[in-house]
Image (cartoon, rainbow, N blue to C red):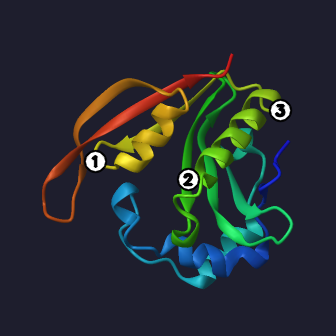
Amino acid sequence: MLHSTRLHLRALEPSDADFLYEVENDHEAWRYSDTVAPLSRKVLREYALTYDADPFSAGQLRLVITEEGNNNLVGIIDLYEVTSRHLRAFIGIYICKEFRGKGYAEEAVRLLEDYAHNTLHLHQLGAKVDATHTTALKLFQDMGYKLSGTLEEWISTPDGKFNDLLILTKKLY
């Protein structure tokens, strides 16, 4: 269920702390999140050691994306703001630079959608996308996510301007 011929989505392990350090401290990706400062290896090791993998109690699920067969680390995919009451969650995804443009993001999202529908029984998934992040916007729109709302001038940019945040959603059933 969490693997295809090319990819495997697996649970976060304590040994992933160094990989998390690289991902979380990619300052180019910070503009698409709320991250404003680097995270230490110590903090990320503690996070990996105490990680609660129950998405309904923790409100999130973080999975590591690896290549099937060789276990190369491709990226991370998350469900966050998971709610059992409303049966919905948002998706966040990060693909390492050397794996971008190869269809891994779409494949990982499809695997996560399948898990969200068949295991977690979620009704809907969403994505929060900076309106200028054309790659992410295209990914989710091509996968059937529909624009459900716009938060105007919601995201500050490094040059002191503001971008709209687009909310895209997809019904799983």
Specify the quadrant of the image occupied by residue 166. top left
Specify the quadrant of the image occupied by residue 46. bottom right
Residue 117: percent from the left, percent from the top? 75, 28
Contact, mark 3 vs mark 2 (Cβ under 8 Å): no
Residue named by callout 3: 119
In the rendered image, the vertical position of residue 93 relative to residue 64, given as above or below: above
Residue located at (40% from left, 56% from top):
33
Residue 103: percent from the left, percent from the top? 60, 51
Q: Earlier in the sequence, mark 1 or mark 3?
A: 3
- Where disc 1 sits, the SS reads loop
Cα separation, mark 1 vs mark 2, equals: 16 Å
Residue named by callout 1: 132
Q: Earlier in the sequence, mark 3 or mark 2?
A: 2
Relative to 123, is 31 on the left or the right?
A: left
Cα separation, mark 1 vs mark 3, equals: 33 Å
Residue named by callout 2: 93
Q: Earlier in the sequence, mark 1 or mark 2?
A: 2
Relative to 131, is 24 on the left or the right?
A: right
- The local crowd at label 2, few if under 14, some if 14 to 19, many if 20 or more residues have their Cα within 10 Å, is some
Relative to 117, is 169 on the left or the right?
A: left
